[in-house]
Amino acid sequence: MKKILGMLGGMGPGATVDAFSKLVTNTQASKDQEHIPVIIVSIPDIPDRTENIIHHGPSPLPAMIDSLRILERAGVSCIIMPCNTAHYWYEDLKSSVNIHFISIIDTACNKIIEMGIKRIALLATTATIYTQLYQDKLKKHKIECIIPDEINQYKIMQSIISYKAGDLIKAKELIYPYIDQLKSLGINKFVMGCTEIPLILNEPAKIYPNDFIDATEELIKETISWYNLNGYTIDDELNKVVEHY
Amino acid sequence: MKKILGMLGGMGPGATVDAFSKLVTNTQASKDQEHIPVIIVSIPDIPDRTENIIHHGPSPLPAMIDSLRILERAGVSCIIMPCNTAHYWYEDLKSSVNIHFISIIDTACNKIIEMGIKRIALLATTATIYTQLYQDKLKKHKIECIIPDEINQYKIMQSIISYKAGDLIKAKELIYPYIDQLKSLGINKFVMGCTEIPLILNEPAKIYPNDFIDATEELIKETISWYNLNGYTIDDELNKVVEHY
C-alpha cells in the first residue's frame, strides 16, 4: 500500500485549498490512481496565530495537536502544514508525533538560498515577522531580509485578514502599493511567506514567477520529491514492475 | 464542538480540489474560525468506476469503504462524495456507516426539478449513463434526459480521461463540439453529471450558469444548508450568544 500524506490545514481554509490544488497540479500522473494519497484535516476553529503571538490571545497549539492526532490515527507517513505563522509551533508539533514533518519555512528558505538571492522582501503576517521565522534562517546564509515598516506591515496584515473574510479586492488594494514602493527602490525579489499571499498576489506571481517565491508551492514541490523517494513500499515497487510486464 | 464534515474524495483528485474549493467559497465566513470543519480523504488508488461497471474490472467498493472507515473513525457527522459514478454504490456505502450521507445525484436532480426544466442533456461518464443514475430519477418527474449517441459518449469519456491525465486542452476539444451540436438543435440545458466536467466546461458554465447545472456546486450548497441547520451543537449556539454579548 502506498504511504499517505497528511495535511494539517484550516489556517486558513482557502490556503489549504491552494496547497491541495498545487499538490494535484504538480504531481505527474496520467490517471487518478497515480496521484499521491492525502488526508486533509481542515478544522479552522483554531485560535488565531497572530492574535496569540502579538496580543496574548489563546494558544492555538492544543487545537493544532488535535488535528495532528486525527492524521496520526489515520496512519499518515508525512505531515505538511500550509501555514507559515503556525510554524512558530513547528518543534512542539513535530516532537508530539513520530512522523516525518516537512517545514514550509525551511523549504522556502532553501529555495531562496538555491536561487542565489542576496536580498529579499518578506511578505508575511505580523506574527511571522515578529517571531523571526524567516529572518533567523536567512541571516545564517547572509541573505538580507527586508521587512515592512509598521504602517506597511499593518496594511499587509489587514490584506491577509480581508482575504480570509472573502474580500479579495480589498486584500489586493492593501498590498499592491507596498510592492510598487519596493520595486521603485530596486527591490524585486519577494518571499510570499504567508499562505494567503499567493492567493492575493496571484497575478504578479504568475507574470514574474522568479521574483515571487511562493512558500506553499515550494512546500508542495519538496513534499512531492519526498514522496517520490519515500512514498512507495517494496510491494508497490514490485506491483509497478508486474504491471509493466 | 462543531460537527465535522467528511469528504470521500480521490475520484478524481482534481474534482476533490474543486469540491473543497466550492465549499470554502460558498461558505459565508468573516474569518477562518467560521468555516466548516472538514476532513478530506483523497486516496485515489481506487479501481476505476467506469472500468468496473462497463468492462468488469475490479470493484472499487472495498477501497471506497476503506476511505469511509477513515472518516468514520475520525468522527465526521456528514459525508459527501464528489464523484457521480461512485454513487452507483451509494446505498452500499450509506448502509455501511451510521452517518448522514448526502447524494450528489439527488441534489443535482432536485435542482433540475426546482428549476422547472423539462428537457436536459446529461454529460457524464459512460458508467453513469449506463447505470441510469440520473435518468431514473428525472423520469419520475417527467423530465426528458438526453444522452449522447455512442460516438459522442466515447468522446465525452475520452474528454474526462484526458482531464484526469492533465490534458485540459484535449479535454475541451473532445467535448465542445457536442455542446455546440446540441445547442444547434435548441437544447441548451446541461447537467454536468461528472465532477470533472465543471472543470472542463468552466468557461461556458461561468458565462451561462443557468444553463449548466453543476452537480458538484449543488452538492456543496446542499451540504452547507445541512450544516447550517445541523452542524452546531447546543454548546456552540450558547458560545455564539456569549460572544455576541
Image (cartoon, coloured by chain):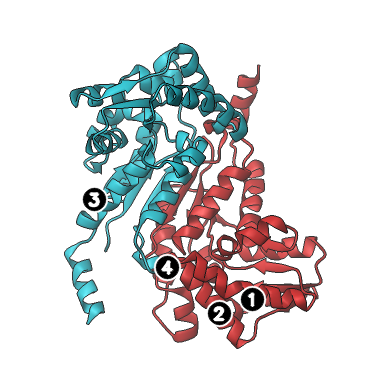
Chain colours: A red, B cyan
Label 4, label 2: how far apart the Cα atoms are: 15 Å
Label 3: chain letter: B
Relative vertical location of residue A70 with respect to residue A106 in this rendering, above or below: above
Q: Name the residue under label 1.
A: A177
Relative vertical location of residue B115 with respect to residue A6 in this rendering, above or below: above
The residue at 20%/62% (across/down) is B233
Q: Considering the numbered disc 1 on the image, is that residue within a helix, a strand or a loop?
A: helix
Quadrant occupied by the C terminus of chain A: top right
* Residue A183 on image: x %, y %: 75, 73
Label 1, label 4: how far apart the Cα atoms are: 21 Å
Label 2, label 1: how far apart the Cα atoms are: 10 Å
* Residue A202 on image: x %, y %: 61, 59
Q: Which of marks 1 and 4 is in front?
A: 1
Q: Name the residue under label 2.
A: A155
- Indicate the amino acid at tag 4: Ala
Label 2: chain letter: A
Q: Nearer the viewer, mark 3 or mark 4?
A: 4
CB under 8 Å between discs 1 and 4? no
Q: Relative to the observer, which residue lies in front, A4 or B134?
A: B134
- Indicate the amino acid at tag 2: Lys
Does the rendering let one see residue A92?
no
Side of B89 where B162 appears, left or right: right
**Are labels 1 and 4 assigned to the same chain?**
yes
Q: Residue B226 carries which label?
A: 3
* Residue B156 on image: x %, y %: 49, 23
Say few, some or many: other residues with alpha carbon within 10 Å of mark 3 (under 14 / 14 to 19 / 20 or more): some
The residue at 31%/54% (across/down) is B4
Label 4: chain letter: A
Q: Residue B175 carries which label?
A: none
Label 3, label 4: how far apart the Cα atoms are: 22 Å
Q: Relative to the observer, which residue lies in front, A49 or B106?
A: B106
